[in-house]
Amino acid sequence: MNEPMRSGAPRARVSVANLRDIGGWHTNDGRVVRRGLLFRSAALGGLADDGVEFFERLRIRTVYDLRTEPERVARPDRMPDGIEHVVIDVLADSSSAPPAQLIQVIGDPKAAEALFAEGRAVRLFEGTYRELVRLPSALGGYRRFFSDIARQEHRPALFHCTTGKDRAGWAAASMLMLLGVSDTDVMQEYMLTNEELLPLLQPVFDGFAAAGGDPELLRPVLGVEEGYLQASIDEMRERFGTIESYFNNGLHIDRATREAIRSAYTTSASSA
């Protein structure tokens, strides 16, 4: 197992949650995922003035917003001027995706109990992670995302959903798998969300408890579990067989574009 190289960019702990560079991971062919080109995070609605300066230092050219329209309306992104903002609603074709319902239920213990209690949260999220692989909106949305970031004019780029863990989680995982990062390290990168995000959400847990809810009910909702990402990986392999086939036959991203992504986002270990 390789440890991620997480020193390639400064951190904005307060105003941008769950933010990290997905670079630094070693690939199976001895290369390393470049740092400073692709970042993931939670939504940017709380971006403070110091956070704006932070993004300017990262030289972000494009932000990909994977959220639904109600999520975007409730908390619009805040970004420095001149950054391209691309909306890609990957769950547009889903009728009951729990990631898009977080804003409504985390402040309502009764609604959360009805939706997430007795193991329903895990089942719902595993179902949604499968949808991220098979929904037409997801296939079309991720096709746009990967086609864009293959081109230099969109880099460096940042992608996010509401908490930066589910829709963004699959984007990061499938990217790393395409680049040749091992399944073990892909899962490790995914699980970093529990370290990066959950401590910042303690006020949400406290407020939920104060309103009469059980904070433990929120842990599988606001955090991540290996079974969630594994559901996406299983769906991908059941439908397409390999990550190459997923990109080729699911996302319709041709070989030349896939090779352009690998060339742009990996480098020799000696150059990392």
Image (tube, rainbow, N blue to C red):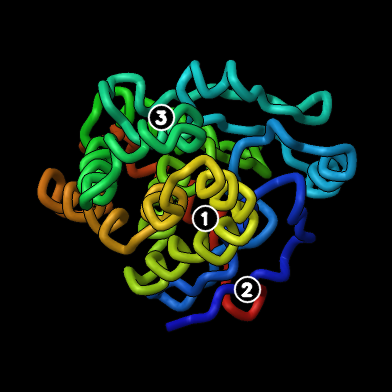
Precedes in sequence: disc 1 or disc 2: 2
- Mark number, residue 101: 3
Query: Which amino acid type corresponds to the residue marked 3 in the rendered image?
Result: Gln
Q: Quadrant of the C terminus?
A: bottom right
Query: Which amino acid type corresponds to the residue marked 1 in the rendered image?
Result: Ser
Q: Is residue 198 above or below residue 182?
A: above
- Closest to the observer: 10 or 214? 214
- Closest to the observer: 220 or 38? 220
The residue that label 1 is drawn on is 263
Residue 107 percent coordinates (x, y): 51, 34
Q: Residues within 10 Å of mark 3 (few under 14, many from 20)?
A: some
Picture residue at 82% right of the left edge, 30% below the top:
80
The residue at the far bottom in this view is 1
Using the rendered image of the protein, determine whether residue 245 is visible from the camera's viewpoint. no
Precedes in sequence: disc 2 or disc 3: 2
Camera-nearest label, 2 or 3? 3
| Gap between marks 2 and 3 measured at Cα | 33 Å
Q: Quadrant of the N terminus?
A: bottom left
| Gap between marks 1 and 2 measured at Cα | 19 Å
The residue that label 2 is drawn on is 5
Query: Which amino acid type corresponds to the residue marked 2 in the rendered image?
Result: Met
Q: Is residue 126 above or below residue 107?
A: below
The kind of secondary structure element at disc 3 is helix
- Mark number, residue 53: none
Residue 132 percent coordinates (x, y): 30, 38
* Image marks 2 and 3: residues in contact by CB distance under 8 Å: no
Q: Is residue 179 above or below residue 7?
A: above
Picture residue at 89% right of the left edge, 38% below the top:
49
Residue 165 as seen in the image, left or right of residue 22: left
The kind of secondary structure element at disc 2 is loop
